[in-house]
């Protein structure tokens, strides 16, 4: 393509004139700058508005610290559970042929088409006042709603498909040949999984974990509904950002938000690095989401 | 399990499928059933009375109209961005390509307060418009802007792979048959991209309708004007009107499942017609 550019720069029939090209590039980049880059810049400039000292100070407030702890805890529970589920689901779906498979794949994607608020609401209805389960669990001293378990459940709900939808197409592409060879050479089922399947899918798995984790730490709507927003107890980082913001503590809100924005940037960098370095091995996966 | 699955020498089918179905039932299915049961608890008349309440209808209208406009704008600029990223080479292309996914990675609450800071009357962009008396934040325009942010990657990422697959030969054939560049693009390229564009539109729309975090900060949340349906669910919950919340949620779910069905139809149709899915 580069050669084509050099030799037929002026009037290639399958290329636009240079001025059209550059106008389109300019319009596209301006749109992205306005809608994507500017908000990112705004987070950091608002966070640092009153100097780096205030910034660091507001990150060390007890509310901010407990929110950071809770967010890490929730992600540390929700992400591994969805990894186990994702591996199980993709093993069953990609390595075997059975009836209703296409339907099962559609079901796994279901949480993506549910509003985050509804994802939280369903747990309020399941465990809240007037439900059967909530009062029964409460009589054993188990609190789900307005407590950490509810936040974990809502987070699992919204991040449910991430790992599975990366692994299913990847494992379908790889087929069952490697595993059959390992089994015929005398490996056990577990050995086959750990030594053959897992190395084959590791980059796809990491890709899924990355996206799953970003969403788990950043989820707002679903968690807002089930958390009850008890200060220092059930406020995750995004919820604490909202609380600071509504209390007109702009700097504190944006300081905490800047940590989440950093997480997003790190996620994007790692994700792009995976795509560039291992693009072939991820090729089967649908990019994005 | 006879006839249910084809024989295989690989182990672990029962274990993994069993775990998958159990986990799915506990985490997704059971709560969704609780939602449907609770919304039917009002009875047929009660359900429709709650669903057709004036404030509920207004919030649904706000959500759907702003989401439609945002998805429309995203289709235009998303197609353009996908085109620019796939077809042209310019400095910083890879960085911009990576940036497209920012709305997937940036927590919605962060996006919400950042957009509000930019478009508020004293904000970086808002102050350009406030001398004319135009307000962006705290109006439906602000809602639309947040929805554009959240929906853009769906359109770009749906169109991009299809555009990469489209071979130049088709365009060359069109050019040798005497079409000018505009005709080639509008009559040859765009029709083959149509299913992807439609899918991207539907995905961006579905996401925007349900969006909460990035919208509520910039929306202003004035009942009947800039109150979105997901927010009204939260308000109903805070009033302990669980059945009312469940009814709005059921209506929204019904509409998004209809959307999902339409997306599947588009993809099935495009596979038949163009030999690929998106």
Image (cartoon, coloured by chain):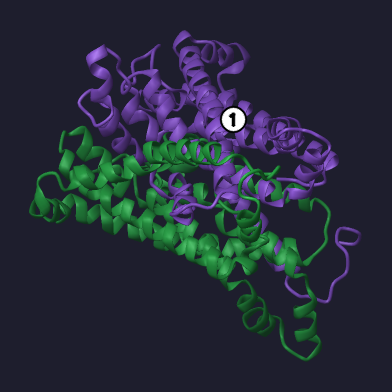
Chain colours: A green, B purple
Graded by Cα atoms within 10 Å as few (under 14), some (14 to 19) or many (20 or more), the crowding at tag 1 reads: some
**Is A112 placed above or below B123 here?**
below
Residue at the spot 52% in from the left edge and 22% down from the top edge: B69
**Is A186 placed above or below B264 here?**
below
- Left or right of B142? Residue A283 is right
What chain letter is assigned to the residue under label 1? B
Residue at the spot 66% in from the left edge and 56% down from the top edge: A4
- Left or right of A16? Residue A211 is left
Judging by the rendered image, the residue that carries numbered circle 1 is B253
- Left or right of A118? Residue A67 is left
Q: Position of residue A270 (x, y in %)?
A: 44, 64
Depth order, front residue of B152/A19: A19
Judging from the image, what secondary structure is the residue with disc 1 in?
helix
Residue at the spot 60% in from the left edge and 23% down from the top edge: B40
Q: Position of residue A10 (x, y in %)?
A: 61, 45
The quadrant of the image that shows the N terminus of chain A is bottom right
Quarter occupied by residue B188: top right
Depth order, front residue of A31/A69: A31
Is residue A114 visible in the rendered image? The answer is no
Residue at the spot 56% in from the left edge and 26% down from the top edge: B72
**Is A82 placed above or below B85 here?**
below
Depth order, front residue of B7/B19: B7
Is residue A154 visible in the rendered image? The answer is yes
Q: Position of residue B1 (x, y in %)?
A: 85, 61
């Amino acid at each position: 393509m580069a050669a084509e550019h050099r030799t037929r720069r002026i009037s290639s029939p399958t290329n636009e004139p240079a001025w059209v090209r550059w106008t389109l590039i300019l319009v596209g980049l301006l749109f992205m700058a306005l809608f994507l880059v500017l908000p990112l810049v705004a987070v950091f400039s608002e966070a640092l508005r009153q100097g780096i000292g205030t910034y660091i100070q507001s990150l060390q407030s007890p509310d901010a610290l407990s929110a950071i702890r809770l967010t890490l805890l929730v992600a540390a529970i929700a992400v591994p559970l969805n990894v186990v589920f994702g591996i199980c689901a993709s093993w069953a779906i990609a390595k075997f042929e059975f009836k209703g498979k296409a339907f099962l794949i559609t079901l796994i994607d279901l949480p993506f088409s549910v509003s985050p608020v509804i994802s939280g609401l369903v747990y309020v209805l399941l465990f809240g006042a007037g439900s059967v389960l909530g009062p029964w669990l409460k009589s054993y001293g188990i609190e789900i709603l307005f407590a950490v378990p509810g936040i974990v459940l809502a987070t699992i709900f919204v991040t449910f498909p991430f790992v599975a939808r990366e692994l299913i197409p990847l494992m379908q592409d790889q087929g069952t040949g490697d595993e059959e060879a390992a089994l015929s050479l005398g490996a056990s089922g577990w050995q086959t999984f750990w030594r053959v399947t897992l190395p084959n899918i590791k980059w796809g798995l990491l890709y899924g974990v990355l996206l799953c984790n970003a969403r788990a730490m950043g989820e707002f709507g679903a968690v807002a509904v089930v958390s009850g927003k008890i200060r220092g107890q059930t406020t995750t980082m995004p919820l604490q950002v909202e609380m600071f913001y509504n209390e007109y503590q702009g700097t504190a809100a944006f300081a905490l938000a800047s940590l989440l924005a950093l997480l997003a940037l790190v996620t994007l960098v790692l994700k792009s690095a995976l795509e560039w370095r291992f693009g072939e091995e991820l090729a089967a996966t649908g990019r994005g989401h | 399990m006879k006839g249910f699955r084809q024989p295989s020498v690989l182990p672990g089918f029962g274990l993994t499928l069993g775990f998958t179905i159990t986990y799915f039932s506990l985490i997704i299915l059971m709560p969704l059933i609780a939602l449907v049961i609770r919304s039917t608890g009002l009875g047929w008349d009660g359900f429709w009375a709650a669903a057709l309440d004036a404030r509920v209808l207004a919030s649904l209208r706000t959500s759907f109209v702003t989401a439609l406009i945002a998805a429309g704008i995203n289709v235009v600029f998303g197609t353009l961005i996908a085109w620019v990223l796939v077809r042209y080479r310019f400095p910083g292309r890879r960085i911009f390509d990576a940036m497209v996914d920012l709305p997937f990675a940036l927590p919605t609450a962060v996006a919400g307060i950042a957009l509000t800071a930019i478009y508020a009357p004293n904000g970086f962009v808002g102050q350009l418009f406030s001398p004319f008396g135009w307000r962006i934040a705290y109006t439906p325009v602000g809602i639309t802007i947040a929805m554009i942010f959240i929906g853009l990657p769906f359109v770009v990422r749906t169109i991009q792979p299809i555009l990469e697959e489209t071979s130049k030969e088709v365009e060359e054939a069109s050019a040798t048959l005497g079409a000018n560049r505009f005709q080639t693009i509008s009559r040859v390229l765009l029709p083959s991209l149509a299913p992807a564009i439609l899918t991207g539109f539907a995905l961006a729309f579905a996401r925007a309708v349900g969006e909460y975090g990035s919208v509520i900060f910039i929306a202003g949340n004035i009942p009947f004007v800039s109150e979105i349906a997901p927010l009204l669910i939260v308000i109903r919950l805070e009033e302990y009107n669980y059945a009312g919340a469940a009814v709005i949620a059921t209506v929204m779910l019904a509409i998004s499942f209809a959307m999902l069905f339409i997306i599947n139809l588009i993809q099935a149709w495009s596979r038949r017609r163009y030999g690929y899915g998106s």
